[in-house]
Image: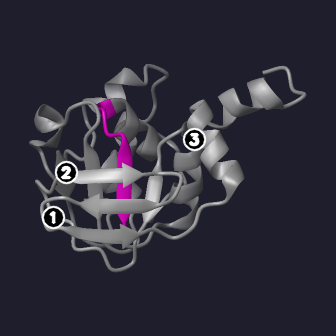
Amino acid sequence: MTYAYGDNIDTDRIIAGKYTKTLDFSTLAEHVLEDLDPTFKSKVQKGDTLIAGQNFGCGSSREQAPLAIKISGVSLVIAKSFARIFFRNSINIGLPVLEIKDHDIESGDELKVDLEKGIVMNLSKKTTHQAAPMPKVMIDILQEGGLVLYLKKYGNYQI
């Protein structure tokens, strides 16, 4: 299922700051997007896609915002543009994000996605979109589940 929202959704709308002071990350999903769409947490299921307009994830640099989205079950975020820190935090925690400047994806649209090629087919509208290219290392990080897991596998670090 896809859930579409508008422009300039900041990190406080994704997860309010008052809920970020926890090490029990499963509680983040209980409050994800509650100020934007109070029904989201009861509808979202594993594998769903979040769709947004311009400047998604603007505001603070808290990595709990993409983490809350991922823990809620969302497997991909597509936006016309992302705040850079949100984009990078998403890659770091293993949440795939695709930037498609002129998408027409709406709530309920059925999508088929090739993450490596950055191709999103909207089966509902019979349209195809090409996402902005993502460097191979970012794809590799996503495939490993995030930066920490990537470094554990390929880095010379003891994490």
Q: Which residue is mark 1?
A: 106
Callout 2 crowding tier (Cα within 10 Å): few <14, some 14–19, many ≥20: many
Q: Which residue is mark 3?
A: 142
Which residue shows up at 39% across the image and 45% down it?
17
Pick whichever of labels 1 and 3 is earlier in the sequence. 1
Pick whichever of labels 1 and 2 is earlier in the sequence. 2
Which residue shows up at 28% across the image and 48% down it?
49
Quadrant (top left, top right, bottom left, bottom right) of the N terminus: top left
Which residue shows up at 29% across the image and 64% down it?
52
Callout 3 crowding tier (Cα within 10 Å): few <14, some 14–19, many ≥20: many
Residue in the foreground of this view, choosing between 5 and 28: 5
Mark 2 to mark 3 CA distance (whole Å): 20 Å
The amino acid on which the numbered mark 1 sits, given as a three-letter code, is: Glu
Residue 78 percent location from the top left of the image: 36, 60
Q: Is residue 136 visible?
A: yes
Q: Which residue is mark 2?
A: 2
Which residue shows up at 29% across the image and 61% down it?
121
Pick whichever of labels 2 and 3 is earlier in the sequence. 2
Residue in the foreground of this view, choosing between 87 and 106: 106
Mark 1 to mark 3 CA distance (whole Å): 25 Å
Task: Decide whether residue 153 is among the magenta residues.
Answer: no
Magenta span of residues:
72-79
